[in-house]
Image (cartoon, rainbow, N blue to C red):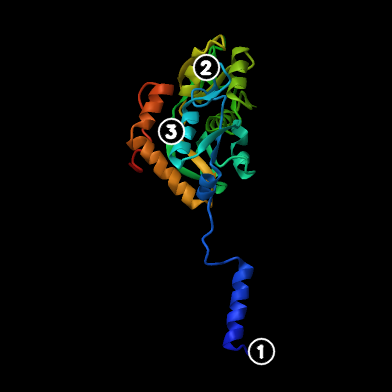
Amino acid sequence: MTKFTPIKKITVLAALIAATGFSGAARADKLDDIISSGTLRCAVVLDFPPMGMRDANNEPIGFDVDYCKDLAKVLGVEAEIVETPFPERIPALMSGRVDVGVASTSDTLERAKTVGFSIPYFAFEMVVTANETSGITSFESMKGHTVGAVAGTFEGIALEKQVKAWGEGEYRPYQTQADVFLALSQGQLDATVSTSTVAMASVNSGKFEGIAVVGKAPFDTDYVALFTNRNEYGLINYLNLFVNQQIRTGRYAELYKKWVGGELPSLTIPNAYR
């Protein structure tokens, strides 16, 4: 057996520390990186009015756009809006294209295996929008019809599951909300389930003729959160505080009035937390 002198023991320990990457220096985290870079890259869905869309000059606007800009402002950096379709939100983060998702993303337990979520910053109710010639007047009357929604969304997953439970009818996935409502207007779909915000914006836009909101869908309230890499605890803590501050300062209510209107939804869960 080799006998180590105290000096040799210290040398071996130092070598092990160097080899395993541990040192006394603090590791810079994502929050530091964003501040140092001078830019916050936000994944935002821009075909999801009034959360994200483009104006007449093709500039990004909407609740999520303003929310990203607010976050960038308190960080002291510039906001970069990265247009990201619904199915590409998490891949955009994992590939390093964006720093944070401000993209109306449901905080599901399955997604939380991959990314880290903040506390909810917005809440959606679900409604049924139907082609006026379909005869659909409620959620239950969708049974047996051809229905669809955006693939990978909270409502899309729930609607596909419901069609399977009914045992009749057909579910069709689409890439964007615009695709869904165009298909609905053209009669390729009989109905869809979406957030009330998107449904009313689409009906009132005048772009999709012959469609109407016919009632609520019995799906849970969809709480959505900001997201980033799950091991970036410093940034996640900052995002939680930011969401809290948006509410406490009245900015959340201000943005809701500007982009949505109506009664401000609560971001707390009844009988769970306040």
- The one nearer the camera, 235 or 75, is 75
Q: Earlier in the sequence, mark 3 or mark 1?
A: 1
Establish if 224 lies above or below 212. below
Disc 2 residue type? Ser
| Residue 124 figure quarter | top left
Q: Is residue 86 left or right of residue 117?
A: right
- Mark 1 = which residue? 2
Mark in front: 1 vs 2:
1
- Mark 3 = which residue? 122
Q: Assess whether mark 1 and mark 3 are in contact (beta carbons under 8 angstroms).
A: no
- The one nearer the camera, 92 or 41, is 41
Where in the figure is residue 168, as x and y percent of width and height? 61, 25
Q: Residues within 10 Å of mark 1 (few under 14, many from 20)?
A: few
Q: Earlier in the sequence, mark 1 or mark 2?
A: 1
Q: Is residue 34 left or right of residue 183?
A: left
- Can residue 268 be spotted in the picture? no
Q: CA distance from mark 1 to mark 2?
A: 77 Å
State which quarter of the image contains the C terminus.
Answer: top left
Query: Could you say whether the residue bearing mark 1 is in a helix, strand or loop?
Result: loop
Q: Is residue 126 left or right of residue 159?
A: left
Residue displayed at 62% across by 35% down? 88
Disc 3 residue type? Phe
Residue displayed at 56% across by 26% down? 46
Query: Could you say whether the residue bearing mark 2 is in a helix, strand or loop?
Result: helix
Where in the figure is residue 206, as x and y percent of width and height? 53, 10
Q: CA distance from mark 2 to mark 3?
A: 19 Å
Residue most extreme to the right: 1
Q: CA distance from mark 3 to mark 1?
A: 64 Å
Disc 1 residue type? Thr
- Mark 2 = which residue? 202
- The one nearer the camera, 266 or 33, is 33
